[in-house]
Image: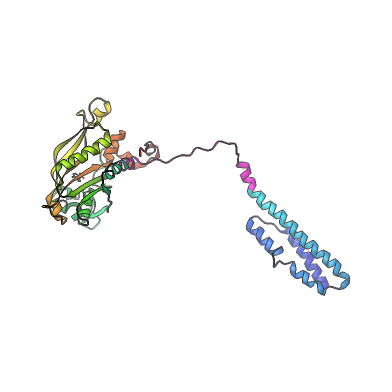
């Protein structure tokens, strides 16, 4: 009987000496197995009472040796685990090396220009509203006083959803005017930025997707002079305090009267001549007094309220600002192109 216990203890010593660990987890299971409160050596100590008196001393020495072997082995294994983890790091780590360059991201030119618009208009009390890109023809066309037979409704110009004659990708952010006027009561003072879609052949000048910012102001006694004042403020903020504007008569189904706003860039610089095709005037946005039909379509009393609206193309503004000659570059997301623009905000 005692012989078996002796050899069990000896076997355990061999077992301990043969242990290898490769990570912290394995080290911890070694510790639990041989040094923990319920370790495997402990039950052998309990066997002491079964050992004959002559051999008790010998057995005691064997067990102490076993325990020490386990403790030494644990220290050795611990060294090998933490040593290997540190070794790789220590070799790579040069505390005297200068820090690496931190590459900052940059904003997309469309975001830079959009943020500028938002900053300019929120400063005078406009709030930002966003709405859906998949619209129905009522909000995109009917409510905006665009008749059934208007060419813009044609499949040639508008992307309709598959198998639908009513659901489409909005062709302008003016649809948000209808969304806002049917859900809010005047006074309304909003700008609505977002992506719009048109079934255009992609070229340097036009794309099937682009961004606009819509503006809408509806209240009692809103006049054309209010609109002109607001847009003059916008132009001075956007293009500099000396900027002059001019409003040219135009036509949009949802405004009456309608106008297009140009800003004076002059003809002195080559860039200004190029952008304005030699006239000095740069076309910037469409605007007008909200057509009473549009107010009525959206359930707003046109006898009591009036309003103005405007729409600005963001890509066009970005192209003018940065001298980008091809709209396709804006959507290609080539990092060499889009990382050039420094945010001013
Ligand atoms: N929706 C027009 C377009 O996409 C732009 C526009 C013109 C918006 C005049 C307006 C406006 O709100 O009053 O070409």
Residue 97, by quadrant, is: top right
Name the spot of residue 259 as percent of width and height, x first: 15, 40
The figure's colour scheme reads rainbow
Name the spot of residue 136 as percent of width and height, x first: 21, 56
Please give the range of residues in magenta: 86-114
Q: Return the residue nearer the eye: 200 or 267.
A: 267
- In reply to whether residue 91 is colored magenta, the answer given is yes
Quarter in which the N terminus is drawn: bottom right
Name the spot of residue 64 as percent of width and height, x first: 80, 63
Q: Is residue 285 visible?
A: no
Return the residue found at the far left: 303
Q: Return the residue nearer the eye: 180 or 41.
A: 180
Return the residue found at the far right: 54
Residue at image location 64% in from the left, 56% down from the top = 24
29 shown above or below 225:
below
Q: Is residue 195 left or right of residue 293?
A: right
Residue 113, by quadrant, is: top left
Quarter in which the C terminus is drawn: top left
Residue 333, by quadrant, is: top left
Q: Is residue 93 visible?
A: yes
Q: Is residue 149 left or right of residue 118?
A: left
How many callouts does the rendering have? 0
Tell which quarter ligand 1 is in.
top left
Q: Is residue 120 left or right of residue 66?
A: left
Name the spot of residue 60 as percent of width and height, x first: 82, 66
277 shown above or below 145:
above
5 shown above or below 331:
below
């Amino acid at each position: 009987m005692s012989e078996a216990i002796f050899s069990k203890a000896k076997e355990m010593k061999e077992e301990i000496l043969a242990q290898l660990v490769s990570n912290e987890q394995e080290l911890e299971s070694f510790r639990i197995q041989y040094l923990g409160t319920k370790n495997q050596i402990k039950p052998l100590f309990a066997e002491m009472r079964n050992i004959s008196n002559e051999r008790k001393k010998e057995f005691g020495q064997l067990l102490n040796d076993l325990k020490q072997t386990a403790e030494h082995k644990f220290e050795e294994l611990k060294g090998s685990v933490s040593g290997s983890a540190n070794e790789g790091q220590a070799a790579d780590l040069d505390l005297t090396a200068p820090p690496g360059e931190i590459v900052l991201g940059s904003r997309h030119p469309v975001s830079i220009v959009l943020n500028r618009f938002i900053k300019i208009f929120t400063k005078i009390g406009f709030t930002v509203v966003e709405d859906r890109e998949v619209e129905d023809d009522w909000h995109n066309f009917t409510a905006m006083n665009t008749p059934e037979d208007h060419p813009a409704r044609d499949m040639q110009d508008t992307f309709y959803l598959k198998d639908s004659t009513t659901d489409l990708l909005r062709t302008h952010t003016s649809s948000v005017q209808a969304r806002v006027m049917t859900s809010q009561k005047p006074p309304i003072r909003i700008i609505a930025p977002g992506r719009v879609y048109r079934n255009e052949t992609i070229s340097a000048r036009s794309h099937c997707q682009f961004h606009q910012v819509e503006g809408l102001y509806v209240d009692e006694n809103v006049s054309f002079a209010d609109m002109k004042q607001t847009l003059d403020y916008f132009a001075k903020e956007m293009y500099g305090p000396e900027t002059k504007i001019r409003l040219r008569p135009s036509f949009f189904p949802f405004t009456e009267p309608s106008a297009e706003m140009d800003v004076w860039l002059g003809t002195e610089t080559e860039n200004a001549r190029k952008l304005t095709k030699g006239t000095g005037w740069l076309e910037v946005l469409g605007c007008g007094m909200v057509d009473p039909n549009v107010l009525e379509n959206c359930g707003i009393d046109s006898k009591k309220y009036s309003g103005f609206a405007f729409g600005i193309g963001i890509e066009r503004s970005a192209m003018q600002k940065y001298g980008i000659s091809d709209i396709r570059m804006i959507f290609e997301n080539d990092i060499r192109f889009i990382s050039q623009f420094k945010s001013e905000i």
